[in-house]
Image (tube, grey):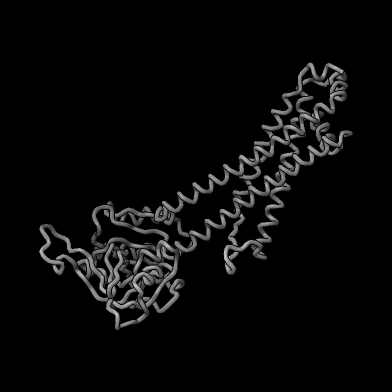
């Protein structure tokens, strides 16, 4: 066994004759354990919060979406349709017509995004799971399903035929507007349902049959603003993305789920990094205790170090004793801290110890990468702290008695 490592293990297990040094060492070890546990718990909590946030948007997000690259719409030809249907990796796809519109009911109005969808949309997404009132739209009918926020802002009821809902969009063209009647296309509709996904989508979107949206925008039956795809399980997204791009060409841009929510992903990743850096700073502060405990141990073992030096131990070997001692303390403390963190996360998932609301426990997720991040962070910082402390040993220190 390595001489320095053997002595370091003995020092790590043995107690000092000075109770103050024992107390400082215990405090340093507890600081490492709690620091590692805290970092793991925070990362797991943030991972759970991220999954919980994305879970709602993923309800209406397809696996892939083709958006027009130039202008507001493109023509989907019969040849395109046949080629897309021939793709074995594509389970279903839905044609989309999306546009910002004004929706008005009685004396209230709101600017929303009207999303016209075909009959496949229910199967491409899980929209039916978030309908909290009423039903989903029927094709070839003047019906809409509004978000909870839109419904509240306009005081929309369900199947209220006494309240007229008008949807307006500006007519394309140039020149001076002579009358409001000629400036807007409009359709009448009835609200048949309300969905609840998240605040942003609830306040922004209204769903309608695709033919109603095409009529409002003066689009032809094969004119769309996008296509949304659900892939078969296990399909290679990048491979399918390339095949769809080859079929539709430069007319479209293909996006996956993360790209559809790039702002949300960037925000969550930035917050995750900020939280990690803050708790890493806390760990660095805690590891100053490790440096202090090692230096106190060096001073306490001064006579023993002098003996080892006289017996032939080199200055480098003596320094490595305390380098190994500090490294072992932080690595073992990190392992214990991660174990405590895992236990707390499991208890939270099983017994909902912390609640956001009376009905909603704080979401947590155990991810393999968090084990690696916490262990590497505590190990690297612990090794640096041990190196700094061990360099305090000089030849003058071990030669004097």
The residue located at (76%, 23%) in the rendering is 393
Q: In terms of image quadrants, where is residue 90?
A: bottom left
The residue located at (65%, 37%) in the rendering is 284
Q: Position of residue 274 (x, y in %)?
A: 53, 45
Q: Position of residue 379 (x, y in %)?
A: 67, 39
**Frontmost residue, 95 versus 397:** 397
Q: In terms of image quadrants, where is residue 84?
A: bottom left
Left or right: 270 in relation to 140: right
Residue 376 visible? The answer is no
Q: Quadrant of the C terminus?
A: top right
**Frontmost residue, 140 versus 163:** 163
Q: Quadrant of the N terminus?
A: top right
Q: In the rendered picture of this protein, how many numbered marks are placed on residues? A: 0
Q: Residue furthest bottom?
A: 162
Work out whether 211 lies above or below 353: below
Work out whether 140 lies above or below 31: below
Left or right: 23 in relation to 259: right
**Frontmost residue, 84 versus 209:** 209
The residue located at (58%, 60%) in the rendering is 363
Work out whether 317 lies above or below 134: above
Q: Residue furthest front?
A: 107
The residue located at (35%, 81%) in the rendering is 159
**Frontmost residue, 165 versus 173:** 165
Residue 254 visible? The answer is yes
Q: In terms of image quadrants, where is residue 146?
A: bottom left
Q: Position of residue 9 (x, y in %)?
A: 82, 36
Q: Position of residue 361 (x, y in %)?
A: 60, 64
């Amino acid at each position: 066994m390595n001489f320095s490592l053997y002595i370091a293990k003995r020092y790590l297990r043995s107690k000092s004759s000075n109770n103050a040094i024992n107390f400082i060492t215990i405090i340093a070890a507890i600081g490492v354990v709690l620091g590692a546990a805290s970092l793991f718990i925070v990362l797991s909590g943030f991972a759970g919060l991220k999954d919980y946030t994305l879970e709602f948007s993923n309800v209406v997000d397809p696996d892939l979406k083709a958006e027009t690259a130039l202008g507001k719409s493109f023509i989907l030809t019969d040849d395109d349709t046949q080629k897309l249907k021939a793709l074995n990796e594509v389970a279903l796809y839905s044609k989309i017509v999306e546009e910002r519109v004004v929706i008005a009911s009685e004396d209230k109005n709101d600017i929303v995004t009207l999303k016209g969808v075909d009959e496949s949309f229910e199967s491409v997404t899980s929209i039916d799971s978030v309908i909290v009132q009423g039903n989903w739209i029927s094709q070839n009918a003047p019906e809409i399903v509004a978000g909870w926020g839109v419904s509240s802002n306009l005081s929309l009821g369900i199947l209220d035929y006494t309240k007229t809902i008008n949807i307006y969009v500006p007519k394309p063209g140039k020149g001076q507007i002579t009358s409001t009647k000629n400036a807007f296309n409009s359709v009448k509709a009835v609200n048949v349902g309300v969905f609840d996904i998240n605040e942003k989508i609830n306040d922004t979107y209204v769903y309608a049959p695709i033919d109603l949206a095409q009529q409002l925008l003066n689009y032809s039956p094969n004119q769309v603003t996008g296509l949304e795809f659900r892939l078969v399980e296990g399909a290679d997204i990048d491979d399918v993305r390339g095949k769809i791009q080859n079929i539709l060409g430069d007319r479209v841009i293909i996006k996956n789920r993360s790209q559809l929510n790039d702002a949300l992903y960037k925000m969550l990743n930035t917050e995750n990094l900020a939280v990690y850096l803050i708790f890493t700073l806390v760990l660095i502060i805690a590891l100053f205790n490790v440096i202090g405990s090692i230096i106190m141990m060096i001073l306490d073992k001064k006579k023993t170090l002098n003996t080892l030096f006289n017996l032939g131990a080199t200055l480098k070997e003596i320094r490595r004793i305390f380098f190994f001692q500090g490294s072992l303390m932080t690595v073992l403390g990190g392992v214990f801290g991660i174990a405590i963190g895992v236990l707390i996360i499991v208890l939270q998932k099983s017994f909902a110890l912390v609640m956001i609301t009376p009905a909603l426990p704080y979401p947590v997720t155990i991810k393999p990468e968090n084990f690696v991040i916490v262990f590497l962070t505590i190990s690297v910082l612990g090794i640096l702290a041990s190196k700094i402390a061990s360099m305090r040993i000089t030849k003058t220190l071990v030669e004097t008695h």
